[in-house]
Amino acid sequence: QVQLVESGGGSVQVGGSLKLSCAASGATFSTYCMGWFRQAPGKEREGVAASSRGGSFTYYADSVKGVFTISRDIPKNTLYLEMNSLKPEDTGIYYCAADQTICRFLEQSWREVRRYNYWGQGTQVTVSS
């Protein structure tokens, strides 16, 4: 089983940047497909971005394309989410998630919360104007 711990959240002003990290342990990092999700108050958790095992294939929600970048450092067992040009609607708790089975149909299913078996505890991102 893989354990996930997010960090890097905080409070920024509109237009600012943050880089989130998700440290993985307890399993071979490169065998998991990974995703970033977020949940705003009163809303459902939504997929933000996902990465294939090796990081060659990445997927993004339309709302973050071109401003967020997902990447992974396999030797460091760490997943990243670099967020630029932040907006108030980006506010929420950001979670990283991992799963092995989803790798078989990542492109079609990466947004589906139920497909991921392993989750971190989340890190808060607040964007204020």
Image: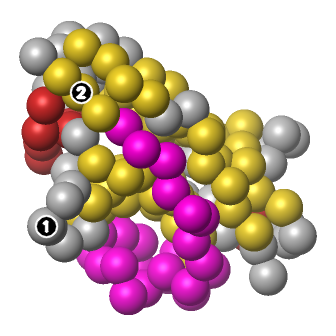
**Residue at 41% from the left image edge and 51% from the top image edge:** 94
Q: Give me the residue at 43% from left, 22% from top.
A: 18
Q: Is residue 94 left or right of residue 111?
A: right
Q: Is residue 48 left or right of residue 123?
A: left
Determine the image quadrant of residue 85.
top left
Asked whether residue 75 appears in the rendered view, the answer is yes
Q: Mark 2 packing: few (<14 Cα in 10 Å), some, or many (20+)?
A: some
Residue kind at label 2, given as amino acid type: Val
- The answer to if 52 sits in the magenta stretch is no
Q: Give the image location of residue 123, x and y in percent.
A: 49, 47
Amino acid identity at mark 1:
Gly
Above or below, 43 relative to 6: below
Report the side of 92 relative to 2 (left or right).
left
Name the one closer to the observer, 102 or 22: 22
The spot of residue 14 in percent (x, y) is: 17, 15
Q: Could you say which is closer to the camera, residue 34 or residue 119?
A: 119
- The residues colored magenta run 100-125
Q: Quadrant of the C terminus?
A: top left
Give the quarter of the image for residue 66. Answer: top left
According to the picture, the residue beneath numbered tag 2 turns out to be 127
Q: Position of residue 52 (x, y in %)?
A: 54, 59
Q: Which mark is residue 42?
A: 1
Residue in the image at 57% along x and 71% along y: 119
Quarter-of-image position of residue 88: top left
Residue at x 50% of width, y 26% of height: 19
